[in-house]
Image (tube, rainbow, N blue to C red):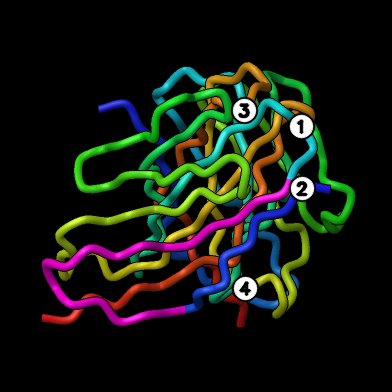
Amino acid sequence: DAMVIQNPRYQVTQFGKPVTLSCSQTLNHNVMYWYQQKSSQAPKLLFHYYDKDFNNEADTPDNFQSRRPNTSFCFLDIRSPGLGDAAMYLCATSRDSGQGSDTQYFGPGTRLTVL
Amino acid sequence: AQKITQTQPGMFVQEKEAVTLDCTYDTSDPSYGLFWYKQPSSGEMIFLIYQGSYDQQNATEGRYSLNFQKARKSANLVISASQLGDSAMYFCAMRAYTGGFKTIFGAGTRPFVKA
């Protein structure tokens, strides 16, 4: 089945130790998104790629970076994780047209713990 | 400004009964899409149903239907014949044409289905 895959599902890192989360998709969608979701809150968009064009949200900290080496894969790098970065990280994709009808499909998420 | 409001933080629902989850939205864009997602405790965001702003009929997908009242700017989700597995967080979301790739999420509503 076509889907969005995230690895690992659970990640534990130490304060200040760089960590990379990965996302892959078999939907051949143009757009890939990274969201941060803290407990009992709505997902917060960090950035997205339209093909190779990177779009950062204005309030995304510099500590968060992303790479998209090809259509299928996208990575979230947290350069120096702090305790406040502990959260669920959700990857999503959409075919994209930029129109309201375009549905985002989410992966299962990576739950990050920072010790 | 675009906004999604979900005012019911949690509720109890009797198994096999229908439940309505409220959602109101605000946008000045005439072209937009409305979405509902289900998020179980595992964390994955599962797409449930979509309603376009120009759609004349309410969207339905199995036990899910969207009660779209455009003049009131409401897009309530109705789950018929509730099941224990329906206990989860539900997010209403909107994407407007002028919003580009950004989807706005509400705060979520969590129905608890009891036997």
Magenta part of the chain: B10-26
Identify which residue is drawn at 49% across, 24% down.
B55
Amino acid bearing label 3: Gly
Q: Which residue is mark 3?
A: A100
- Chain letter of mark 3 equals A
**Up-down relation of residue A64 to residue A82 (above or below):** above
Q: Separation of disc 2 and disc 1 at Cα?
A: 9 Å
Identify which residue is drawn at 15% across, 65% down.
B83
Amino acid bearing label 4: Ala
Q: Which residue is mark 2?
A: B2
Do badges 1 and 4 share one subunit?
no
Q: Separation of disc 4 and disc 2 at Cα?
A: 28 Å
The answer to which image quadrant residue B23 occupies is: bottom right
Query: Of residues B46 and B19, which is closer to you in this image?
Result: B19
Q: Separation of disc 1 and disc 3 at Cα?
A: 10 Å
Q: Which residue is mark 1?
A: B29
Tag 3 near tag 2, CB within 8 Å? no
Disc number placed over residue A86 in the picture, else none: 4
Label 4, secondary structure: give it. loop
Residue B42 % position (x, y): 34, 65
Query: Of residues B7 and A70, which is closer to you in this image?
Result: B7
Do badges 1 and 3 share one subunit?
no
